[in-house]
Image (cartoon, grey):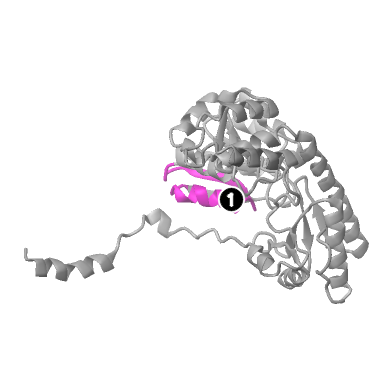
Amino acid sequence: MSNQSAHSRAPTLLNHGTEMAERVRNLTPYEPVCSLTEIKRNAGISHLKLDWNESTIPPAPRVTEALLGFLHSNAGLNLYPDMCYAPLLESLAEYVGCRTSQLLLTNGSDAALDLICQTYLDPVDKVVHPTPTYSHMLQFAERTGAEIRGVTGENPFVPHLQDLVPAIDERTKIVYLASPNNPTGNVHAPADVLKMAQRHPNTLFILDEAYFEFSEVTCVELVDEIPNLVVTRSFSKCFGLAAVRLGYAVAPEEVIANLRRAHNPKSVNMLAQVAATAALKDLPYYRRFASEVKRSAALFKGFCDQRGIPCHPTQANFVLVQFPDVPDMARRLAEAGVYVRDRSDQMPGVLRITLGTKSQTMEMLARLDRILAGKPSRSQGTRP
């Protein structure tokens, strides 16, 4: 073949490109709705970022000290992270109340959920879950080609595990339960989870406990009782380490061994390991914050009750509030420097609002009160 004929074909080959996998072509991208761009654009305004259920306060001071110490020691950002995780695993096992062999660290709890789906799901399998629930998990499952079956209960704010039973069959490989659930805040009683997992021994039950530090309800103790359970948790919520991405799975040793087959141990970076190890040394700091969030929930509920606004507190760090025109209220709050999440796609007429400290909540409610009274919003002033 001449060089001329070869070159004449090149543009055709390049323009054709490579087709993506069929299962990816049919996916709907996860579209993040984030207020950071607006916050950075208006740095002089006192902002309240209450849209992603992040911690509203910085991590414990010793976390910052540990990170600075690591950087100043020239410990090796040029090197791959420690892939044994020994110091962190030992502290985490003590905190969780399990053995280190029952733990697997991941790059955020999202990575743990994704890893479980990649490890256990084939296209012929099915995933069952209450709806509405955490949508990113559903995308992880959908990416495997598995069938996704959501089950809607009569009341979205009441756990309805028994309603899932008719949907579980021999193809059901995973049942996904977020507890507390995002966005409803529902918490599943460990006794109910135990009964269902025992009833369906060939189905893996995922308990997503990203908000455990607020609810203090956990299924971790069931790991030693049943082989078909995995609990995932996060350092992104109460611990305030969302930026460094660290999560973990707690499961029977056989499940952990299975997950390791597809796990990339390099994915847990050293800054995350250093920060989490330090955070676990200052648990009173985080427990005080969790208590503040509970007080904020009561404050928020009282405010709404006085004004006849439907409000649903949760055992997580957010409340759900109903307004006649949710997009308009979200826009007006943003103009006042308060960023919240419109959850109308899952629950019509509902705003999800992250809770922080009592002083932050009082500031948020003051701005909301001005909006409800038809007064100009005030977002200038001291940052709460």
Q: Is residue 67 left or right of residue 352?
A: left
Q: Position of residue 6 (x, y in %)?
A: 13, 66
Horizontal side of 56 relative to 98 (left or right) equals: right
Q: Position of residue 188 (x, y in %)?
A: 71, 39
Q: Position of residue 327 (x, y in %)?
A: 71, 71
Can residue 198 be seen here? The reply is no
Q: Secondary structure at mark 1?
A: strand
Percent of width and height locating residue 51: 70, 59
Q: Is residue 277 above or below residue 337?
A: above
Q: Are there few (<14), some (14-19), or many (20+) residues within 10 Å of tag 1? A: some
Residue under the point 80% across and 54% down: 312
Q: Nearer the viewer, residue 378 or 291?
A: 378
Report the magenta residues as a range. 122-146
The quarter in which the C terminus is drawn is bottom right
- In this figure, which residue is indicated by the disc labeled 1? 150
Task: Residue 228: name its quadrant.
Answer: top right
Between 346 and 108, which is closer to the camera in this rendering? 108
Q: Quadrant of the N terminus?
A: bottom left
Is residue 139 found inside the magenta-colored segment of the image? yes
- Residue 83 shown left or right of residue 351 in the figure: left
Residue type, mark 1 in image: Gly
* Residue in the foreground of this view, choosing between 71 and 285: 71
The residue most toward the left is 1
Residue under the point 65% across and 30% down: 92
Q: Quadrant of residue 106?
A: top right
Q: Residue at x 44, y 59 (%)?
A: 26
